Amino acid sequence: MGRDAVHMRLNLEKLFPVTPTFMITTFRPVTREDSQNLGELFHKAYGGTVDDEGETELDALHEVAGTFGGKYGDFSWTTSLVSEIDKSLVSSSLVTLLRGIPLLAFTVTLPQYQNNGIGSHIISQSAGLLRDEGFYELRLVVTRSNPAINLYRSLGFVEYDHQSR
């Protein structure tokens, strides 16, 4: 990651559940059939943010396919989730196992649904599923200037020196 990357981890033993304030949202596991809609979600969610590098929707679709295909480690179909409102994707958490350690590879929420607890809830749900599978930690990498870093901190993620471990 070329930007000022912050490596964070969450101790899953200290996980607490989060309830979204936007209660008409449903959550379910990701399927391969979600690829196209995830590409669209990624493109809309990243557009105009600090992590926007001018990617097209097709680029976003390729990123989803790469994630499913192992670009960031083995994809975790059992702990990766999507959130829907009226059968439209509004949020997603994509989890991989990078060298056997859970990585929150992507978490995205459409801008119009941010700050309603949907992102917190979907991350919390994925983390809980990981804990249920016997994992003790969830890691992520975020651009320091990305406002989502505050969301991650509020969920209990802490920065760590990834080079010393």
Image: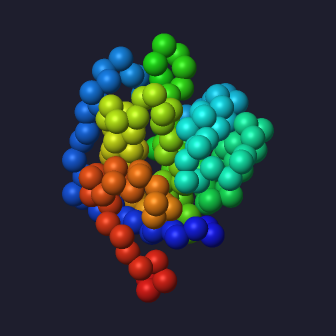
The residue drawn where x is 45% and y is 64% is 144
Image side of residue 15 versus residue 93, left or right? left
The percent position of residue 113, horizontal first and vertical second, equals 42, 29
How many numbered tags mark residues here?
Answer: 0
Residue 165 visible at all: yes
The residue drawn where x is 39% and y is 39% is 119
Residue toward you, 20 or 65: 20
Colouring style: rainbow
Q: Quadrant of the C terminus?
A: bottom left
Image side of residue 36 versus residue 50, left or right? right
The percent position of residue 72, horizontal first and vertical second, equals 62, 59
Q: Quadrant of the N terminus?
A: bottom right
Q: Residue furthest bottom?
A: 164
Q: Is residue 88 above or below residue 53?
A: above
Residue 76 visible at all: no
Q: Is residue 130 above or below residue 28?
A: below
The percent position of residue 55, horizontal first and vertical second, equals 72, 46
Residue toward you, 53 or 18: 53
Q: Residue furthest front?
A: 48
Q: Residue furthest top?
A: 86
The residue drawn where x is 71% and y is 48% is 54
Residue toward you, 33 or 40: 40
Q: Is residue 90 above or below residue 86?
A: below
The residue drawn where x is 28% and y is 52% is 155
